[in-house]
Image (spheres, rainbow, N blue to C red):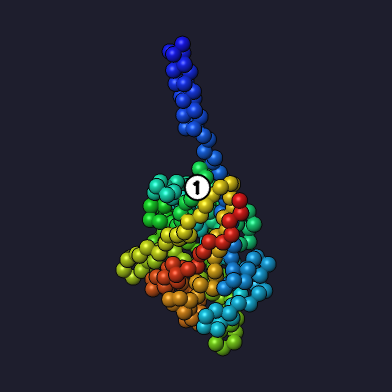
Amino acid sequence: MKKYLFLCIGLTMLFACSSDSDELIKEVSVTLKFTQNWDGADVTKSDFSKTEFTNKLGTKLTIEQLRYLISRVALVDGKDNVTLFDGYNLVDLSKEESLTFNLPKKVSEGSYKLSFVFGFNNEDNKTNAYQDLNTASWNVPAMLGGGYHFMQLDGKYTSTDLTKKPYNYHAIKAYNTSTSESEDTFFIVDLGTISLTNNSTIEIKMNIAQWFKNPNDWNLNDLDVSLMMNFDAQKQMHSNGKSGVFSLGTITQ
């Protein structure tokens, strides 16, 4: 009788432990949603060529195109385990479908640090490697180092002589055409820690105004077009971008 009693107790403990260890861990999907603003005022494609913005130096400008590329989205959990998501997203303010990016695999619920690369790092920035980007005319000419753009921001501004002039604020890997020297201008955007408990949509905000200020107050009268071949201008763009163009917005779960 005692043997049967001990057997029952043992089986009860075994199943109880098994039940505890077999508790399901919920997996969630993540979508990134990209929004744009000018120092807090929303910017959408409806503003193109109509809405006038004023930069740090007081220059008035309009926007006619905004496209930028993000890659290597990563989620890092509390134990420093990294989930790196393949692929990239070319955000085009004129195309609604490009403003969201569904990460291609699920992750376990929990707290994560969220980051991504603005543009391509050197490993990914390979000339003619991506057919969809070739079709989108996203290439950089070989004479400027090849690879791909990181951003195209185009429009018109009111110059000091009160005429409307074009600007092409295009970010690429900095390349000196005289010396063939190059310098990295991609940067990692660290958005801090987020908590995922359900399928989530995470807003990533771009403050367009920041591209024109801090640490470099941008004078469009001096730096408006032909910036891709301007080695120093590319480095200034990089500095401004790293200084807070992107930030974390709302998280919907």
Q: Secondary structure at mark 1?
A: strand
Q: Position of residue 46 (x, y in %)?
A: 68, 67
User: Residue 165, located in which quarter of the rendered image?
Assistant: bottom right
Residue drawn at (58%, 56%) of the image: 251
User: Which residue is label 1 attached to?
Assistant: 110
User: Residue 178, located in which quarter of the rendered image?
Assistant: bottom left
Q: Nearer the viewer, residue 82 or 47?
A: 82
User: Residue 41, located in which quarter of the rendered image?
Assistant: bottom right
Q: Position of residue 245 (x, y in %)?
A: 50, 67
Three-letter code for the amino acid on which mark 1 is drawn: Gly
Q: Is the residue 241 above or below the residue 74 in the image?
A: below
Q: Position of residue 121 (x, y in %)?
A: 40, 56
Asked whether residue 64 is in view, the answer is no
Asked whether residue 117 is in view, the answer is yes
Q: Nearer the viewer, residue 90 or 214?
A: 214
Q: Is the residue 197 above or below the residue 55 in the image?
A: above
Residue drawn at (57%, 73%) of the image: 39
Residue drawn at (51%, 64%) of the image: 246
Q: Nearer the viewer, residue 120 or 209?
A: 209
Q: Please, which residue is most extreme toward the bottom here?
A: 161
Q: Is the residue 51 above or below the residue 189 in the image?
A: below
Q: Please, which residue is most extreme toward the top here?
A: 1
Q: Position of residue 213 (x, y in %)?
A: 48, 76
Q: Is the residue 21 above or below the residue 187 in the image?
A: above
Residue drawn at (56%, 44%) of the image: 28
